[in-house]
Amino acid sequence: MTVRVLLPRMLADCTGGRTSLSLDLAGDATVCAVLDALAAQHPVFDRRVRDETGALRRFVNVYVDGDEVRRLSGLATPVPSGAEVMVVQSVAGG
């Protein structure tokens, strides 16, 4: 199955400058499986998005077809074939 991952410019430096990636995953996928696949190709990306326990960092939001995964099943949220997964890194400051 294939999913499309959209990334903000501030994370593109971790993925070779790409803000859109297409991932081929085996079987039923979850948000965790999508992030694992990205981590295998781009380890720096993983350190920016997940903490040392594997949880999403507080300032990172992930959406599957427009729905925030924290309001669903978190990293266990299913990702259907053809879905669009968007990773958004919050920006803070004053």
Image: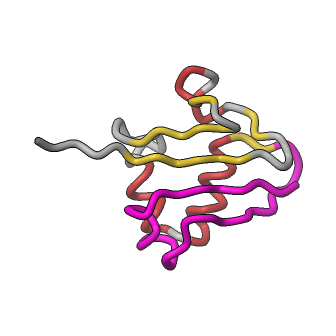
User: Is 24 inside the magenta-drawn segment?
Assistant: yes
Given the current orientation, which residue lies at the most extreme top position?
71
Locate residue 81, reporting x and y percent.
Answer: 86, 47
Image location of residue 67, percent across then percent down: 63, 29
Relative to 67, is 10 above or below? below
Residue at (83%, 49%) from the top-left corner? 82
Up-down relation of residue 17 to residue 36 (above or below): below
Q: Quadrant of residue 29?
A: top right
Residue plotted at (22% across, 42% down): 92
Give how far across and how far down residue 80 sits, in percent.
82, 40
Chain part drawn in magenta: 1-28
Extreme-front residue of the structure:
94
Residue 85 as seen in the image, left or right of residue 57: right
Taking depth in this image into account, of 1 and 33 the one nearest to the observer is 1
Query: As rendered, which of 6 and 56 lies closer to the eye?
Result: 6
Q: Magenta span has 20? A: yes
Q: Residue at x 75, y 34 (%)?
A: 78
| Vertical position of residue 73 compared to residue 80: above or below | above
Colour pattern: secondary structure
Of 69 and 52, nearer the camera is 69
Residue at screen point 63% across, 44% down:
32
Whole-percent x, y for residue 53 in the image: 43, 42
Corner quadrant of residue 1? bottom right
The quarter of the image holding the C terminus is top left
Q: Residue furthest bottom?
A: 16
Query: Of all residues shown, which one is farthest toward the left?
Result: 94
